[in-house]
Image: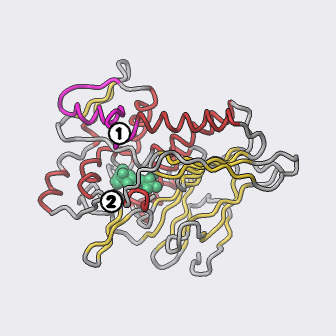
Amino acid sequence: MRQFRQRGIILATIMVLLLTSCSKKGVEPQSQSFLMLGTVCRISIYDKPSDTAFKAAFGRIREIEERMSLHKESSEISRVNREAGKSAVAVSPDTFLVVEKALEIARLSGGAFDPTVAPLVEAWGIGGDNPRRPGREELETLLSLVGYERVTLDKTAQTIYLADEGMALDLGAIAKGYAADEAARVLKEHGVGSAIINLGGNVLTVGRKVDGSLWKIGIQDPEAERGGYALIVELEDTSLVTSGPYERFFTLEGETYHHILDTATGYPVVNDLISASIITESSFLADALSTTLYALGREEGLSLIESLEGVEAIVFTGQHRIITSSGAPAFTITDEHYHR
Ligand code: ADP
Ligand code: MG
């Protein structure tokens, strides 16, 4: 993801159609990948692949991107941001729902997760072509524009209003999760009962494998190349989403700056975690909470997760320890550098 953004390559939509080995039922599983939501989005269907199912699911992801992207001038989020301090903007039910949920998580996390973090995100530009380290004064000014309490939602009119000019929303920490849930819903409407949706590491499993066994999903080794796993979890109908500083960062004068920002200081979050994963049914919640867990850090983050039913966490510390919430599913460590 980082490479694409940093090199500024504008890639036309690419499609890869992969045929993998025959399943027991004799159906060929199929995968397709497209560049959407600033990352590689891949859907693999195991039981009932069809062009119409792929088309509908990717169409839905594209629609969500068109509505929520911070980088598209025509998106609803860009319109809301342009009208900050001026007027309320009517949006689609999609955008309204995602912002509404984002504000709930913001309240739940005491603002550690905050969708109004956009002015800070833009100033740092981490993951973009020109990342930079803003000065302290600049950060102070920008921090005054961050505050989820100053977002007004009107449910009847389906409008969003940001109280002050310069305020802006960034749904980068949750839109992929929402898109994954929606893609799964669309696949099911097309009769698909066995699939994996992977939106740049944001994984949602649909059903089970066609032979009835559980999916084996790897959690990225934060210290290895992309695709190197540190542990494997077995799941069905569940989402697994990981957030961490290794995903997007830049280095300046020997210091590394990553993309999850501390809404109190304006700087990247500093803690002893190197990755934070959430396992829960909804990918939307998993996405929002993995960023939140990382932003809150080990103690506060894990105690928030413990308080939520049906939500589990697996975190990696800088000392290579793996710590989980009390109901986390069983897993196998595949990299000996890590231990419980
Ligand atoms: P990714 O999308 O890279 O997998 P995340 O889901 O953790 O990772 O989202 C990180 C993105 O969320 C950042 O790139 C930025 O756009 C946004 N963000 C950064 N800090 C915060 C924060 N404290 N609260 C909410 N969103 C944030
Ligand atoms: Mg997230």
Q: Quadrant of residue 231?
A: bottom right
- Residue at x 49%, y 62% (from the top left corner): 276
Tell me if the residue at label 2 has its CB under 8 Å from ligand 1: yes
Between disc 2 and disc 1, the foreground one is 1
Magenta span has 74?
yes
Mark 2: few, some, or many residues within 10 Å (few <14, many ≥20)? many
Inspect the image, locate mark 2, and give the three-letter code of the amino acid beneath it.
Ile
Name the residue furthest left: 137
- The answer for how far apart the CA atoms under marks 2 and 1 are is 17 Å
Magenta span has 126?
no
Considering only vertical position in the picture, is 218 above or below 79? below
Q: Nearer the viewer, residue 164 or 256?
A: 256
Q: Quadrant of residue 181?
A: top right
Local secondary structure at mark 1: loop
- Residue at x 33%, y 47% (from the top left corner): 114
Q: Check residue 94 in the rendering and tell me which mark sits there, or answer none.
A: none
Inspect the image, locate mark 1, and give the three-letter code of the amino acid beneath it.
Lys
Q: Check residue 72 in the rendering and tell me which mark sits there, or answer none.
A: 1
* Range shown magenta: 68-90
Q: Earlier in the sequence, mark 2 or mark 1?
A: 1
Q: What residue does disc 2 label?
A: 126
